[in-house]
Image (cartoon, rainbow, N blue to C red):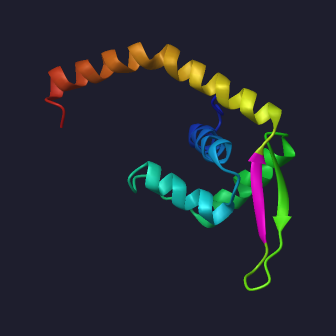
Amino acid sequence: MCNEKDPQRGWLQFLILRVVCETPSYGYEIIKKIEEMSHGRHIIKTGTMYTTLRRMENSGLLSSVWEKNQDAPDKRIYKPTTKGEEFLEKWFENLIESRSIIDSMIEFYNNKFGGR
């Protein structure tokens, strides 16, 4: 499921889908939710976010609609498609399958390096 050319892109897609599956959202809101979920460890640049959203929409993982606002700029609201939800489900399945390996690696790290 991960993008082999750019693993971070795959993670970003995963995080975006996780956010919009919970609540359809606009780009800047997605950025803020990812920052909040990661306790500030993942700061996504605006350009990166909108490029990724466009790419995900073009590949059928997301759909969007324009939300009209009288007192503020219009916002493009993204939500997952059925394909996007299936993609997210596969990501979670892969994470669950990989969890024992990751736990083993963390245990090794803690034992070898004292969990720096």
Left or right of residue 3, residue 101 in this image: left
> Which quadrant holds the C terminus?
top left
**Residue at left 48%, top 58%?**
43
Looking at the picture, how far across and down is residue 84, in whole percent?
76, 35
Q: Residue furthest left?
A: 114
Query: Which quadrant of the view contains residue 70?
Result: bottom right
**Residue at left 19%, top 25%?**
110
Looking at the picture, how far across and down is residue 97, in whole percent?
51, 14
Nearest the eye: 77 or 31 = 77
Above or below, 97 against 14 in this view is: above
Query: Which quadrant of the view contains residue 72?
Result: bottom right
Looking at the picture, how far across and down is residue 12, in whole percent?
60, 45
**Residue at left 73%, top 57%?**
51
Q: Residue furthest front?
A: 70
Residue 8 visible (yes or no): yes
Left or right of residue 48, residue 39 in this image: left
Task: Decide whether the magenta segment is chiefly helix, strand or loop.
Answer: strand
> Residues in magenta?
75-79
Q: Is residue 23 part of the magenta span, yes or no?
A: no
Query: Which quadrant of the view contains residue 6?
Result: top right
Residue 44 visible (yes or no): no
**Residue at left 45%, top 55%?**
36
Nearest the eye: 62 or 51 = 62
> Which quadrant holds the N terminus?
top right
Q: Is residue 78 part of the magenta span, yes or no?
A: yes
Above or below, 106 against 25 in this view is: above
